[in-house]
Amino acid sequence: TCPSHKQATALGSYGRVPHASAFDASSKAITWTALVWPTLLNGAPMTILSKGDLSSAGIRLSLDANGITGEVATEAGPCSATASIKLTKRTWYRAWLSIDPAARAITVGCAPLSNSGATETAVTVTAPGALKPDSAAELLVAARDGETGKTAIFEGRIEAPLVFRTAA
């Protein structure tokens, strides 16, 4: 027989694009978008797409029960924009994050793909400093890098993640 022992296990799955320099948004506008179908809305943020670390240089698109949030690292620290929309479990939404470094603009939005009664919503904020999206980090779908591995794993389905070389 063998004695048992505790073993830490990271639950959830995610996708990664290790050579994501093609998604560099340091000088050109870029839009990230995906179809999402959340199955758990317990208040904790869940990552849709992420790249880099917001404390130095990075981009993140996430959701919680109150809406969709886009975050971008800037010279003045992380800057966020939230499109407030009451999300419903097991409902499809299109979520997007657009950044325009020249205008220091961050736009985040969400549109339901059903007759749930919710309407499309989008919010644009101007960052307090120059945007610092990370061009060298890998692109993660459904997770973000944390101190102990991948965290904020998305609970549900993510389909058709896209990156456009223009702001929406």
Image: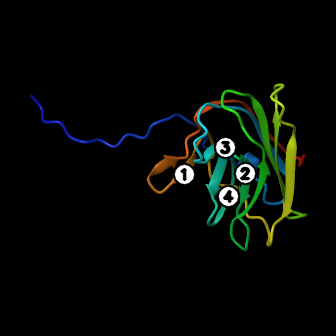
Q: State the mark number for residue 145.
A: 1
Q: State the mark number for residue 65.
A: 3
Under circle 4, the secondary element is: strand
Marks 1/4 in contact by CB < 8 Å: the verdict is: no
Q: As shown in the figure, which amino acid type bears the numbered disc 2?
A: Thr
Q: As shown in the figure, which amino acid type bears the numbered disc 4?
A: Gly
Horizontal and vertical percent position of residue 3: 13, 36
Instruction: Bin the neighbour count of mark 1 within 10 Å (Cα to Cα): few under 14, some 14-19, many 20 and up.
Output: some
Marks 1/3 in contact by CB < 8 Å: the verdict is: no
What is the C-alpha distance between the residues marked 2 and 3?
11 Å
Splitting the image into 4 quarters, where does residue 79 fall? Answer: bottom right
User: Which of label 2 and label 4 is nearer to you?
Assistant: 2
What is the C-alpha distance between the residues marked 4 and 3?
23 Å
Tell me the residue at 70%/49% (across/down).
21
- Quarter of the picture containing the N terminus is top left
In this picture, residue 123 sits left or right of residue 91: right
Q: Earlier in the sequence, mark 2 or mark 4?
A: 4
Q: Which residue is mark 4?
A: 58
Instruction: Bin the neighbour count of mark 4 within 10 Å (Cα to Cα): few under 14, some 14-19, many 20 and up.
Output: many
Q: Earlier in the sequence, mark 1 or mark 4?
A: 4
Instruction: Bin the neighbour count of mark 3 within 10 Å (Cα to Cα): few under 14, some 14-19, many 20 and up.
Output: some
Asked if residue 28 can be seen in this view, the reply is: no
